[in-house]
Amino acid sequence: MKADEMRRKIDELKALADEERPDISEDLSRLASKLQGESLAAGGMRAWDRVQLARHQDRPTTIEYIDMMSDRYIELHGDRSFADDPAMVGGIAEIGGTHFTFIGHQKGRNMKENLHRNYGMAHPEGYRKALRLAKQAEKFGRPVLSIIDTPGAYPGISAEERGIGEAIARNLKEFSVLKTPVIAVIIGEGGSGGALGIGVGDYLIMLENTVYSVISPEGFASILLRDTKKAEQAASLMKMTAYDLKAYGIADEVIPEPEGGAHNDPDLVASRMKERVLAVYGRLRRRRSDVLLKDRAKRLEAYGHVRGG
Amino acid sequence: MPITIREIVQRVIPPKTIRKRHDLALDDRSYVKKKHACPSCSSHIEEDELVRNLYVCPGCGHHFRIEPTERIRILCDDGVFDEVYGDLIPENPIEFPGYEEKVQSAQQKAGAREAVQTGIGRIDGRKVMMALMNFKFLGGSMGSVVGEKIARAMRLAAARSLPMVLFAASGGARMHEGIFSLMQMAKTSQAATLLDEARQPFIVVLTDPTTGGVTASFAMLGDITLAEPGALIGFAGPRVIEGTIKQKLPDGFQRSEFQQEKGFVDAVVPRNELKSTLVFLIDSSRYKR
């Protein structure tokens, strides 16, 4: 769609939305963000620039967004069988009058915090804590808000010994049939299985300067391009930006960020996120749980491109 | 949950099935070698001896990596296998340069259309849905086709009330398909829930090697998880971990026996006991009211 055409479409929809059609105002905000995306792409934002912004040290973290979006929240700790993982947080937050169970990767804001948070790379106990809290959400009919921001699950001895593969696999399976709405938001890095491990749900929002990919661009460069220095090139080949994922139908919407990135106005981004999360929940909550699960299954079944059969 | 139209269709209309008999005498794969050196003890083994010994080194017990064809010959009655979804082939969803050529050369090299074969065979008379991964095809990597075939096989097994046995062998997600390869993890894991609903056993046999996105999805979701001796099983590969911790990993790390010790594998089963073990597990997992 050309930019002019898109603006015309927006005007048309605005007229309709005035008659209080929430579904249309949603399309509207989507179109608007698409339009902004087009102009930014024209403004020369490269995939690699998005990667840099997604990883930016000053970017607001999960707990900071929860704090800004909620009237009150409490963090809940531990997986009940091994430990509490500081790289994965979770708890209950009251957002716009609704109690959400939140789970999310937690990065630090400086070296010391990052050592404590393991740079947002969770261990198996992190994923098991997330599942424990999600199950609790299901029991009380609380929606789940999953906030994704990780380079990936921790690739180390301790994680392997405690079954990081099994922990992620279990989450994928259990979240696919969790009888309560799950809304996921990528606020920074969506790194591979570590991101997907809390990323299966009914709706995926990506902030504008975020990425989601099967492997880091550095890993991709080293394995497929056989040159670690080609990460920049890899980032664009991989189609990993929010707008790529939106175009593929994997992300449902992109939330625009202020000039220069989310860290330039965290409150603005938090308020946009809050508004969108509540709007999406407003729609999901009306679905009966069997319908919710059927829709989620359809969504998962549709992933991928095959020929024949 | 109410029955969907697709489920009815799956019950009534069978998918296109191609019956093939996997017979050693009919094997025309030119790349199959006649003499083998054991990767573990380097002793030389003649092809017939290796075949007789189920591709296990008679000297040291090393389990050779084998392909779906060998697996079917070893396990299925008369080597007969009714393949389903065999006509699915990949697209190039992120338009990765050179992917089509890569797939074509893998197809020639492995003599298979994709990295997994799905179909129905009989193990000692028991009808079983099987999925057999092929490490020779782009490292057994999971792209859209692998995910789709495994998910469909699970759905068909659930609809037809068949137990499912899956042989895992994979380096992980197929990066050439970008985000779509990652999403296969979610798709296959969701499909595994259908076997729960249908109360059909999902038995996973981990073979060398099973790593990455496959380990972090369906390969770890079996009701029962078996492993062949000495197989490398993990999420992050050893080289990645060594890169993280900047030191060499201890011997036996991430091997089948290690995974059993850590609690992630039910039993390490040598290849010559696999058939009888599967039969026992299938027979003991029929739902009794």
Image (cartoon, coloured by chain):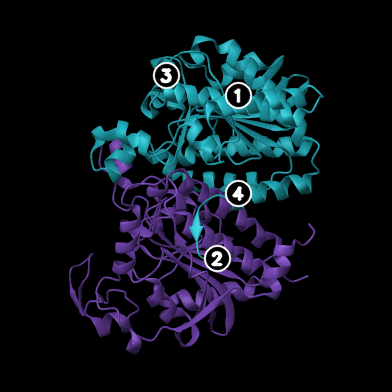
Q: Residues within 10 Å of mark 4 (few under 14, many from 20)?
A: many
Q: Chain of mark 4?
A: A
Three-letter code, disc 1: Arg
Three-letter code, disc 3: His
Distance CA(mark 3)–CA(mark 4): 31 Å
Q: Residue under label 3, please give it.
A: A56
Q: Residue under label 2, please give it.
A: B203
Residue A7 image label? 1
* In the image: residue B74, left or right of residue B9: left
Q: Residue under label 4, please give it.
A: A300
The structure residue drawn at horizontal position 25% and vertical position 42%, both measured from the top left corner, is: B248
Q: Are marks 1 and 3 in contact (CB under 8 Å)?
A: no
Q: Are marks 2 and 4 in contact (CB under 8 Å)?
A: no
Distance CA(mark 2)–CA(mark 4): 23 Å
Chain with cyan colouring: A
Query: Dividing the image into 4 quarters, which one contains the N terminus of chain A?
Result: top right
Query: Dividing the image into 4 quarters, which one contains the C terminus of chain A?
Result: bottom right
Q: Position of residue B69 (x, y in %)?
A: 39, 76
The answer to which of A112 and A72 lies nearer the viewer is A72
